[in-house]
Amino acid sequence: MKIVGIGGSYISSRQTMKSFRDAYHSSTIFPRLSLEKWQESDHPDAMKFLRQRTLDLINFSNYLADQLEILQKGEYLVEHQQLLSRQYN
């Protein structure tokens, strides 16, 4: 903003010109398809990709490794909070 100024053109700024080719976001959910490739692929539905990524995260994550420990800590905190509440009420 300092260099371009209010109302200036960020599109033609030196920084934009220097880095625009590397600025694309790479999604882990949706493939990067041009319109032509999307049409050639029979117009894939975005929800299919989202659903598949969600299932992959559920099926291949290691969240269960520490789930029991986290639940035990949470139950401990709730139990002690209830005891403290009884003492001060």
Image (spheres, rainbow, N blue to C red):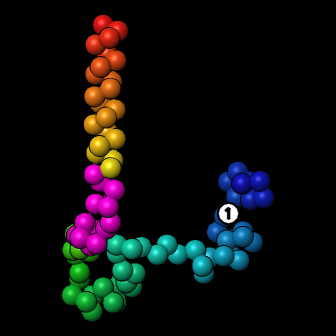
- Residue drawn where x is 28% and y is 51% of the image: 68
Decide whether residue 33 is among the magenta residues. Answer: no
Residue 84 is left or right of residue 46, and the answer is right
Query: Is residue 50 in view from this perspective?
Result: no
In the structure shown, which secondary structural element does the residue marked by tag 1 occupy? loop
Residue 23 is left or right of residue 71, and the answer is right
- Residue drawn where x is 37% and y is 84% of the image: 33
**In the figure, 49 relative to 73: above or below?**
below
**In the figure, 77 relative to 58: above or below?**
above
Please, what is the three-letter code of the amino acid marked with disc 1? Ser
- Residue drawn where x is 67% and y is 63% of the image: 9
Q: Position of residue 38 (x, y in %)?
A: 30, 85
Of 67 and 45, the residue lying toward us: 67
**In the figure, 71 relative to 85: above or below?**
below
Q: Residues within 10 Å of mark 1 (few under 14, many from 20)?
A: few
Decide whether residue 67 is among the magenta residues. Answer: yes
Boundaries of the magenta span:
53-68
* Residue that badge 1 annotates: 9
Residue 62 is left or right of residue 45, and the answer is right
Q: Residue furthest right?
A: 3
Main SS class of the magenta portion in the image: helix
Q: Quadrant of residue 7?
A: bottom right
Query: Is residue 71 in view from this perspective?
Result: yes
Of 86 and 23, the residue lying toward us: 86
- Residue drawn where x is 33% and y is 24% of the image: 81
